[in-house]
Image (cartoon, rainbow, N blue to C red):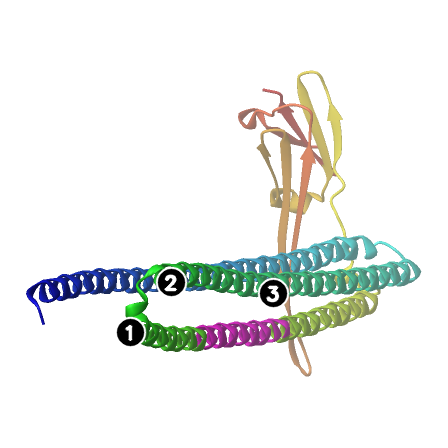
Amino acid sequence: MSRPTDQISKSVRAQVETVRRTHTKEIEAIEDNFQSRKDDLKINNENAIINIQNENHKHVAAESEKKEKILMDMKKGLEDTKFRTDKELASLKNMNENTTKDLRQKTSLDRDRISQEQSESLEQMNDQFNEKSRDIRHNGNQRLNQMEDSEKQKFSNLRDYHSQKVGNQTIQFNKRFNTDEQKYREFKDVQDKTFDKERMTTHLRQQKDITKLGKEQDFQLQQKDQKFRQGLKEQDVFLEKKWQSTMNEHAENFKNLDDIHKKVVSKVKTDMTEEVSQIVKRSDDKFYQFTEMKPVVTHFPDRVEIKVEVPEHSKQDLQLTTNNKEAILVYNRRFQDTNKNLLGSARIHRVESFTSRINVDAILDPRSVKSTYDGDAMTYVIKKA
C-alpha cells in the first residue's frame, strides 16, 4: 500500500476515533442526565409521599384531640346536670322541711294535699330529668355520627388526591421519557452509518435498562400505595373501635346516672312518707305541738315596746337581746320533780325553749333596754339608735 493511502487510512481512523469518542461522551452525558432526572423524580415522589403521610398523621391527631375535647365537654355537662339535680333535690328537701312546720298547724286533709303536690312535683322533675337525659344522649350520638362521616370523607378525599397525584407524576415522567428517547433517536440517525451496529447494540442495552428501571419504579410505587392503603385501613379500624368504646362508656354513665336518680327519688319519697306519718301520729300529742310566745310590738318615733305574756314565777327565764334591726326573745325554763308511790318512784325532767325574732324598721340601742312586769306580762322598752 502506498504512503498516501496509509495517510488517508490514518486520517479516516483518526476521524472515526474522534467521532467515536464524541459519540461515547454524548451517550454518557445522556445516560447521566437520564439517571439524574430519574433520581430527582424518585426523591421528589418519596418526599411527597412522606409529607402526605405526615399531614395525614397530624390531621388524625388533631381530629382525635377534638373528639377528646368534645367528650370532656359532654362529661362536664353530665356532671353539671348531676350537680343541678342534687341541688334541686336538696332544695326540695329544705322546702319540705319548711312545709312540714306549716303542716303542724293544719288539718290532716291539708297534709294529704301537700304530700300529693310534692309527689306530683317529684314525678314532674323526674320526667324532666329523663327527657333532658334523652336529649343529651341523642345530641351526643348525632354529633359523633357527624364527626365520623366527616372523618371518612376527609380520608377518602386524601386518598383520591394522593392517587391522582401519583398518576399525574407517572404520566409526566412517561412524557419526558418519550421526548428524550425521540431526541436521542434523531441524534443517533444523524451519526455515521459506520457505527450502526454499535449504535443498535447500545440502543438495545438502553431499552432493556429503561424497561428494568420502569418495572422497578412501578413495583416501588405499588408497594408504597399498598402500605399507604393499609395505614388508612388501620386508622379507620382504630377510629371505629375508639368510637364504639366511647359509646359504651357513655351508655354505662347514663345507666349509672339513671340508677342514682331513681334511688335518690325513691329515698326522698320514702323519707317524706315516713316524716308525714310521724307528723300525723304526733299531731294529737301536746308535747309535739308547736307553740310560741306571741309578743305584741308597738312602734313609736323614738322607741319600740315589746309586750310578752309570761307567768310571774317564770319571768326570770325570759331574756331579750338586740342585733341591729332585730329584737331576739329567748324563753328557757326547766322543771324537775320526783314522786314516790307504792311501786317505787317516778321522776320528771321537762325543758321548754322558745325563741322569737322580731324585725323592726330602725336600728335598736342594746344599752337602752328596760323591762317592767305588771303581774301577767313583761314589757320591754328599747330606744332607737
**Where is mark 2, residue-wise?**
189
Observer-nearest residue: 17 or 35? 17
Q: Which mark is residue 137?
A: none
Q: List the residue tagged with mark 3.
A: 156
Q: Quadrant of residue 156?
A: bottom right
Instruction: Identify residue type, mark 3.
Output: Ser
- Residue designated by label 1: 198
Q: Magenta residues, as a range?
A: 221-247
Q: CA distance from mark 1 to mark 2?
A: 13 Å
Answer with mark 1 or mark 3, whichever residue precedes in sequence: 3
Question: Residue 205 location, x and y as percent?
Answer: 33, 76
- Residues at marks 1 and 3, CA–CA distance in whole angstroms: 52 Å
Q: Residue furthest left?
A: 3
Amino acid type indicated by mark 1: Glu
Horizontal relation, residue 136 to residue 6: left or right: right
Mark 2 residue type: Asp
- Horizontal side of 74 relative to 220 (left or right) equals right
Residue 115 magenta-highlighted: no
In the rendered image, the quadrant that contains the N terminus is: bottom left
Q: Which residue is pictured at 66% across the width and 21% down the height?
A: 303
Name the image quarter holding the C terminus. top right
Disc 2 is placed on an element classified as helix
233 in the magenta segment: yes
User: Label 1: few (<14), some or many (≥20) within 10 Å?
Assistant: few
Name the residue rendered at 65%, 74% in the picture.
Answer: 256
Lower sequence index among marks 1 and 2? 2
Identify the element where label 3 is drawn: helix
Residue 48, image x, y percentages: 42, 60
